[in-house]
């Protein structure tokens, strides 16, 4: 296989939400290792210093930018940094988002401020950052690739987390519409727009609401464990790279098969409603 298909050498990629120490930081490392100069954006300078300084010390081409992309000023500061960075603008990864533990609540208790905060944090940042990068690519008449993080919660139900799940579902819808609008045109090269939807992944953010329970993970997830940030980052790199040059408007589910497990299945994948224990015993004999 031609390894150049994964190379991003000479290209500039913006990563919004790069310094949380989880998926965004791992994507930053992988994209920089693929040869891109990464404009790495985070709201907090402390997070940039903590998580990105080690990458810079390794010699990786990372340009840290402290900016709040939930604001027009923050997006403007990010795009100013892009224009100062050597290389051809190629892509954007929207990682910024998430939800703090207090946002978990019954539908009947969600306030307008709860709803708006989660939509601003997850959907608006993704859309307006994508809008800015797409406009710059069109101005330069350059092709490009935009990748956004949705969630398994946006592709399924999200009980007690309706605002977050709905915002992540809206990312999928926005991805499809932008992909169609930006795919081609008389005066522009194609800008591809795709998304990645992680399942339960081991990150600093997920540790605030998910404890260590390998037995539970084996019961709930087809592959028997939670995902790693590098596994999500690999899907992102694929969608940024020329390996996915004919893909747009798609959402890749990276969940270890979590979505394949019905809620009524036991650890051995047989129905919890199954009364005949001899059937379970027979399955074990067949698998032996």
Image: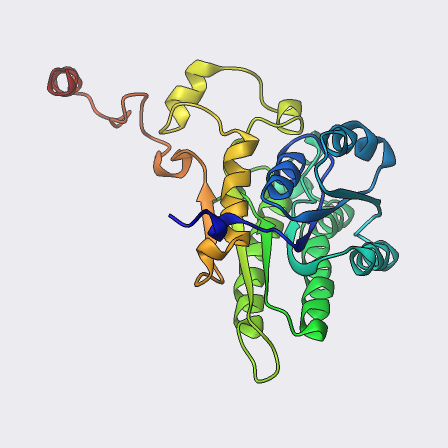
Question: In what quadrant of the picture does the C terminus appear?
Answer: top left
Give how far across and how far down residue 52 sits, in percent: 76, 33
Which residue is pictured at 46% across the width and 49% down the height?
Answer: 252
170 relative to 275, above or below: below
Front residue of 141/169: it is: 141
Say left or right for 274 vs 6: left
Front residue of 251/184: it is: 184
Where, by quadrant of the figure, is residue 175 drawn? Answer: bottom right
What colour scheme has been applied to the protein in the rendered image? rainbow
Report how many numbered discs are placed on residues in the image.
Answer: 0
For the view shown, which residue lies furthest in the bottom direction?
186
Say left or right for 235 vs 111: left
81 relative to 181, above or below: above
287 relative to 58, above or below: above
Front residue of 16/91: it is: 91
Give how far across and how far down residue 238 sits, in percent: 49, 48
Say left or right for 140 vs 219: right
| Residue 56 can be seen, yes or no | yes
Give how far across and how far down residue 138 sits, in percent: 67, 73
Give how far across and how far down residue 88 sits, in percent: 68, 61
| Residue 152 can be seen, yes or no | no
45 relative to 218, above or below: below
Where, by quadrant of the figure, is residue 270 drawn? Answer: top left
């Amino acid at each position: 296989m031609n390894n150049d298909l994964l190379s991003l050498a000479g290209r500039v990629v913006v990563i919004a939400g790069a310094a949380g120490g989880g998926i965004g930081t791992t994507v930053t490392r992988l994209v920089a290792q693929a040869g891109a100069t990464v404009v790495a954006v985070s709201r907090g300078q402390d997070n940039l210093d903590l998580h990105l300084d080690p990458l810079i010390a390794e010699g990786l081409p990372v340009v840290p930018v402290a900016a709040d992309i939930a604001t027009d000023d923050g997006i403007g500061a990010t795009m100013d940094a892009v224009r100062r960075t050597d290389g051809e603008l190629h892509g954007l990864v929207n990682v910024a988002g998430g939800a703090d533990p207090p946002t978990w609540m019954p539908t009947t208790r969600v306030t307008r401020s709860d709803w708006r905060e989660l939509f601003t944090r997850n959907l608006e940042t993704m859309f307006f950052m994508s809008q800015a990068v797409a406009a710059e690519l069109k101005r330069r008449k350059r092709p490009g690739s935009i990748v956004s993080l949705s969630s398994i919660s946006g592709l399924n139900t999200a009980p007690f987390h309706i605002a977050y799940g709905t915002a992540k579902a809206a990312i999928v819808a926005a991805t499809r519409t932008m992909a169609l609008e930006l795919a081609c045109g008389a005066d522009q090269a194609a800008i591809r727009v795709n998304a990645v939807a992680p399942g339960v992944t081991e990150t600093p953010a997920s540790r605030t609401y998910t404890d260590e329970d390998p037995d539970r993970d084996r019961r709930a997830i087809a592959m028997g464990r939670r995902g790693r940030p590098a596994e999500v980052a690999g899907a992102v790199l694929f969608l940024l790279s020329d390996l996915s040059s004919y893909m747009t408007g798609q959402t890749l589910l990276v969940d270890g098969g979590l979505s394949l497990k019905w809620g009524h299945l036991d650890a051995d994948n047989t129905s919890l409603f199954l009364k005949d224990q001899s059937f379970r015993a027979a399955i074990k004999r067949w698998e032996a």
